[in-house]
Structures are given as C-alpha cells and as structure tokens.
Image (cartoon, rainbow, N blue to C red):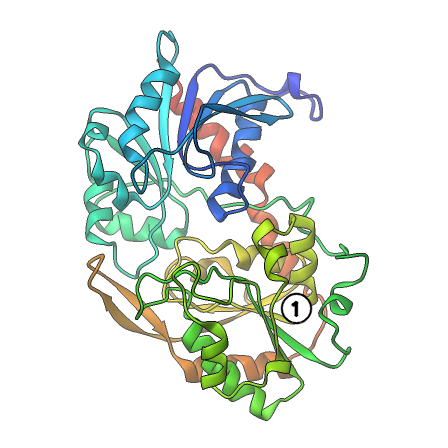
Amino acid sequence: MAKKGNPTQYEQLSGSVMWYTNSPDTKTGYGRQIDQLVSRMTRHGIRTAVHCNYGKEGEIGKYKTKHGDVTLYPKSYTGYSVDMTPVHYKHFTLNRDEPSMLMTLYDTWVLHQNKKLDELDIHSWTPIDHSSVPLEVASWIRKPNVKAIAMAPDGQRQMGRLGVEAPYIPHTIDTKVYKPGHKIDGVKPREFFQLKDDDFIFGMVAANKANSGLVHRKAYAENIMAFGVHVKKYPNSYLYIHAEPSRALNGFDLPRLLKVNNIPEDNVIFPDNVRLRYGFSDKEMAAIYEGMDFLLGPSYGEGFQVPLIEAMSVGTRTIASSWTAPQDLISDTSYAIAGQLFWDEHQGAYYQVPNVGSVVNAMEEAYNAPRGRCETSIEWAKQFDIEKVWMDKWLPYFKEHLTK
C-alpha cells in the first residue's frame, strides 16, 4: 500500500461483492458493521452491493460513501428476503467479466429457506450465539458451497469441533469516534444522566426483542432481578436501559419486570423513546457509555456483542457472560459471571442462563472497585478498530478470494 491518506493511492482490487444483511444506513448492529465495511471496500476499488433484508424497500437504490456508491437491493415480501438473494446477485454480476463474491452477515439458519442458494459459492460471516452450534447453523456451514467466517474466537472453536475451518474476523468499532471526551446535548455524560458524582450507574445496551414469551436472549429478567437485589443495599445505584421498554418489538414489558422486582422508578433511567427510535449517533452513544460506571451485559449467548467493545473503548468496564463470544472480548479488568446450561428447543442448541447470584456479586465488586476511566480497557478495545481489522484481516481475505 502507498502513502496513507489519499484514497486513490490505496491498493485497488478488481471484482464485485454483494452482501446479504441489513442496509448500511440503518443503526442496527449489522447495519453499522456493514457501513464500516462497504466504505473501505469501495475505497479499495471493490464494486459493492447490499441485499437489504432490513432498511430498504421498493426499488434499487444507492448508498453514498466517500469513495463511491454502493448498490442497495430492497427487501422482498418474505420474512428474511432470501427468496430474492440469488436474483439480486445475478442482476448485480450480470455480464461482468470479473471475479465476484456473495457474502452474508446474518443468522445463517434463515438461509435454508432458498435451495437456489446451494448453487452459489457463498461466504458466511457466521454468528454463533449458543454454547453449542444450532443444528441448522451446523448444517449450513457444512455445505460444500459455503465458506464460513467466524466473528468470535468461540465461534471459531465451535466450528472447528465440527470439522469446519473458519478464519476469525471480529466485529469492529471506529476508535476515532468511540473514544473518551464526547458530550451529549452539550453536557458531560454524567450531567446527561442527571446524577451526582458519588452516584453509581450500571448501563444496559441490549435490544428488547425476545425469541418467545418465555426466552429473552439478552437476559433482562436475570439482570433486572440482580439489580433489584443490589439496589436494596446500595440505594445510590442506578440502572440505565438503552432499549424500547414496551413489548412493541416482541420483547418483555420492562416496567412490569422492574415493578415485580420492587425497583424504585427513580433508580431506573430510560432514554427518550422517540429519540431512541430515531437513533442516537455514534458520538452520542460513546458519551452515554462514558457516563456509565459499568456496562451490564450478561446474556444467554452472543455471536459477538459490540456494546462490550464500545463501552471499553471509552474506558468503561463491563460485566459479561463467561461463555460464547463475550468470554474472549472483555479485558481482564472486567467481570465474567457464571451460568447454567439451558436447552433451546427451537434451534436445537444450548444457551446458558446467567446465574443471578453471580451477577449480584459482580455488581457489588464493581460498586466497590476504584472508579474512573479504565485505560486498560481502552487499550484492549483498540484491537477491534475497523481500520486495523480491515488491513490485517478483511483486505487479505478479499485479495485471496477475489481472484479468477
């Protein structure tokens, strides 16, 4: 690569790549990941498209990056839009005398819905959010036409036990944005929460979407129960929940759950609901994380869990699960809690349920630990910077596979 700074001097690749995932202009987890990727793909000359299973409807559109436009194919009439993925891919690569790739960033079990995908070579950046590989995920990554990519070391290990060799390429953040020092609404983060300096605040950044009325992968019931125990002993502790509080997204009724656990309303903070739906910017999210003393992140299982590295990038330590992806994502200054295996009949695999007592103990240790910015966490999070991961992992991957 030539000198850094001028995009035209970056090594240029030849080929076309279409992703099946969320639209890059949405503020979902997948949307933010693909936004970071497509801007660098176009920077290096890769002709790029996204088949949007969320965030784009009606007609083919364009997503502008600094280095060129990305073609956006709309979702279809089916739930996950996989019926149109081969059609869009054929349209995007038609009459192109160049190497091409079809890539996926989504739960791979949905891809079984279209048998025509078996006719294409596919690269699947695969989330494994259970403590064992779900049956349909295992079936997908074992297909002869599929090349799996692990997004976490645990996923790579689990795939390896199935005989699937997959490179590890993590999810990323932009550390030029996710860094300490941002304000929100013109004030410092603690002022935004309207808390005193000696108040203690845990934060949850987790979508309130449930697999069913019984199971919530983000462990809201367990985390809220643990906070209910904690706040009785430490009444100057607060819980910020960055999520839709109602069941609008098929999640849990969080105000009811808080009430059942006898948690005072004054000790819980929700963001403005309309603003939440419009989406907070990355700088605003960085400020929110910095305002927390600890991120509360135990769950039943994670394919990655970007909020952990977002929080650590601004110096906020975390409480997380000691299984699936989180076990390898947190620095040694954070707390990893224990859990119990729990069978997920729907996907044919095991989750783990966070042990409430273990979460309570971690919260007490966190409360009594030295406070302030954690430089160790900031340094740890730098390994997930998008530019580093792109140059070290993604660019070599595309150079290897975009060949005739």
Residue lying at 69% horizontally and 44% vertically, measured from the top left: 176
Q: Position of residue 228 (x, y in %)?
A: 51, 85
Q: Nearer the viewer, residue 259 or 164?
A: 259
Q: Nearer the viewer, residue 33 or 7?
A: 33
Identified by mark 1, the residue type is Met
Q: Badge 1: how crowded within 10 Å, few (<14), some, or many (20+)? A: many
Q: Position of residue 94 (x, y in %)?
A: 35, 11
394 sits left or right of 90 in the view: right
Res 311 visible: yes
- Residue placed under numbered mark 1 in the picture: 292
Against 220, is 23 above or below?
above
Against 103, is 257 above or below?
below
216 sits left or right of 110 in the view: right
Residue lying at 50% horizontally and 37% vertically, measured from the top left: 34
Q: Quadrant of residue 299?
A: bottom left
Against 247, is 379 above or below?
above
Q: Nearer the viewer, residue 381 or 177?
A: 177
Residue lying at 44% horizontally and 53% vertically, measured from the top left: 304
Q: Position of residue 276 (x, y in %)?
A: 59, 56
Q: Position of residue 143 (x, y in %)?
A: 19, 36
Question: Which residue is most to the right?
Answer: 186
Res 361 visible: no
Q: Nearer the viewer, residue 27 or 391?
A: 27
Q: Quadrant of residue 134?
A: bottom left
